[in-house]
Image (cartoon, helix red, strand yellow):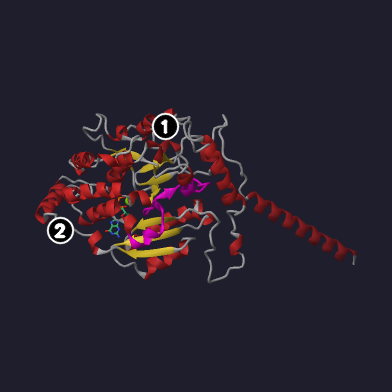
């Protein structure tokens, strides 16, 4: 009997010990920080000197509270009852009118699945923003099934109408074909591709006016096979709204000159024709070293973008796109949507409306943006190698952006040159 009691007591002790261990493990996996992130000097991480500090403070605190305290990242309380017909619970109050947007082929499914998984794990599982997928062909069932299962918000699938993915009537087909043959011989990347040119023209002039996109005011562009290396600990859409930003980037670089020999001629034509659209405090200096005479090829890399759709749908942007489109350089050369968006942002927006997201760590082959500053990287659980950060290398234009905007470069930038 006595041995039975001892054994019983041992079982009880084991059970209590087990419960305590499970409790400790589960609580330690919850996010530990609910304060805005600051460096040793008390500077808010993710913002830089020169940015609106008081505003940052407000936004970072709000976002931290919504994203991290009320919604533990390990388990979503709304999912504990597993209602099978509603696995995407409605998002927190006060969300932005925003969506992710991806242009993809059916064959891109496994590459875009990887990107979505990372965006969800690092950010969207706490916010449940929608995701719009666009394609020049109908999406197949596998594409829709897999992406819908991965996205925590609602998914929408749009087929692009032919007018937005074909040669406009004014393009001389023979001339365009000769250009492709010549570029193929010169081994210019995507130089012989027709579909790549339709893609660049579509991203430059049409994605933001697709019927599905008309429901939203903000977008975050995501491409196949990209990586997010750090937690996104606040809502970047709300950051954009509250800080009056319209366009943002994480990587910038110089464009291949062979793909845009006459792009700046068209831009100059636009500037002459529509001086009323040029912003008073624009970023011409980011784009040109001789006050607009020539283009220095600097552009923001548009495979990552968080931006305002109403700006792209504005008369200023549409006039800009149409001037370029009429000149035919999407087909007679191989103009990319990155220089097109960047030049528009540089000329039509005030400097203060363009934002650099240091704290969104990102990779698209072959470049990495890994946040400068160890504090940010550790606190945001980043897994990128800081040695691979492209920002301060000579082929990046990000230093120019900092100088133009009189921003102080984050501590440690010297070591990453
Ligand atoms: N639907 C569709 N999407 C395309 C096509 N070509 C490229 N894309 C998409 O357009 C984006 C840019 O293409 P990508 O191959 O990544 O070009 P890169 O990043 O410039 O090398 C990606 O989101 C692709 O999935 C196409 O022919 N059809
Ligand atoms: Mg790509």
**Residue 229 is at least partly visible in this image:** no
Rendered image: mark on residue 169: 2
Q: Are marks 2 and 1 in contact (CB under 8 Å)?
A: no
Q: Residue at x 46, y 56 (%)?
A: 117
Q: Position of residue 176 (x, y in %)?
A: 13, 52
Q: Residues within 10 Å of mark 1 (few under 14, many from 20)?
A: some
Image quarter of the C terminus = top left
The residue mark sitting in front, 2 or 1, is 2
Which image quarter: residue 299? top left
Which image quarter: residue 106? bottom left
- In the image, 129 versus 212, the foreground residue is 212
Work out whether mark 2 precedes mark 1 in sequence or the reverse, and give the earlier one: 2
Magenta span covers which residues?
210-238
Q: For the residue labelled by badge 1, is the local secondary structure a helix, a strand or a loop?
A: helix
Name the side, left or right, on which 180 lies relative to 157.
left
Q: Residues within 10 Å of mark 2 (few under 14, many from 20)?
A: few
Measured in 3D between alpha carbons, the distance from the residue under mark 2 to the one under mark 1, in whole angstroms, is 49 Å
Q: For the residue labelled by badge 2, is the local secondary structure a helix, a strand or a loop?
A: loop
Name the side, left or right, on which 144 lies relative to 297.
right
Q: Is residue 32 above or below residue 392?
A: below
Q: Residue at x 37, y 36 (%)?
A: 351
Residue furthest to the bottom: 85
Q: Is mark 2 within 8 Å of ligand 1?
A: no
Image quarter of the N terminus = bottom right
Rendered image: mark on residue 416: 1
Residue furthest to the left: 174
Q: Position of residue 303 (x, y in %)?
A: 35, 48
Q: Position of residue 287 (x, y in %)?
A: 29, 35
**Residue 358 lies within the magenta run:** no
**Residue 1 is at least partly visible in this image:** yes
Q: Residue at x 47, y 30 (%)?
A: 412
Name the side, left or right, on which 351 lies relative to 275.
right
């Amino acid at each position: 009997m006595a041995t039975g009691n001892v054994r019983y007591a041992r079982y009880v002790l084991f059970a209590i010990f087990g419960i305590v261990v499970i409790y400790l493990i589960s609580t330690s996996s919850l996010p530990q920080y609910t304060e805005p992130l600051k460096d040793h000097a008390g500077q808010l991480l993710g913002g830089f000197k020169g940015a609106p500090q008081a505003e940052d403070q407000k936004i970072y605190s709000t976002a931290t509270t919504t994203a991290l305290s009320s919604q533990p990242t390990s388990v979503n309380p709304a999912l504990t009852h597993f209602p099978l017909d509603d696995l995407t619970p409605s998002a927190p109050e006060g969300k932005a009118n925003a969506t992710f947007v991806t242009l993809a082929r059916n064959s891109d499914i496994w590459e875009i699945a990887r990107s979505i998984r990372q965006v969800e794990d690092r950010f969207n599982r706490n916010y449940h923003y929608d995701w719009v997928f666009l394609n020049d062909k109908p999406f197949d069932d596998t594409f829709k099934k897999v992406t819908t299962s991965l996205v925590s918000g609602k998914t929408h699938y749009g087929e692009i109408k032919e007018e937005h993915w074909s040669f406009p009537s004014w393009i001389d087909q023979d001339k365009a074909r000769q250009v492709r043959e010549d570029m193929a011989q010169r081994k210019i990347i995507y130089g012989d591709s027709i579909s790549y040119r339709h893609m660049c023209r579509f991203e430059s002039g049409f994605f933001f006016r697709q019927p599905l996109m008309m429901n939203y005011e903000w977008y975050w562009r995501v491409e196949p096979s990209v990586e997010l290396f750090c937690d996104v600990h606040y809502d970047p859409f709300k950051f954009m709204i509250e800080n009056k930003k319209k366009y943002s980037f994480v990587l910038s670089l110089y464009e291949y000159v062979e793909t845009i020999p006459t792009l700046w001629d068209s831009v100059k034509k636009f500037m002459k024709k529509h001086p009323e659209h040029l912003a008073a405090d624009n970023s011409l200096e980011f784009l040109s070293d001789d006050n607009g005479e020539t283009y220095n090829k600097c552009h923001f890399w548009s495979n990552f973008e968080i931006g305002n759709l109403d700006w792209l749908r504005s008369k200023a942007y549409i006039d800009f796109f149409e001037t370029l489109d009429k000149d035919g350089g999407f087909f007679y050369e191989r103009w990319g949507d990155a220089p097109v968006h960047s030049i528009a942002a540089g000329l039509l927006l005030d400097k203060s409306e363009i934002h650099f997201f240091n704290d969104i760590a990102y990779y698209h082959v072959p470049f990495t943006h890994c946040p400068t500053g160890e504090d940010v990287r550790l606190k945001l659980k980043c897994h990128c190698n800081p040695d691979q950060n492209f920002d301060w290398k000579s082929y990046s234009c990000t230093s120019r952006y900092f100088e133009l905007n009189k921003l102080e470069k984050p501590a440690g930038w010297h070591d990453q040159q």
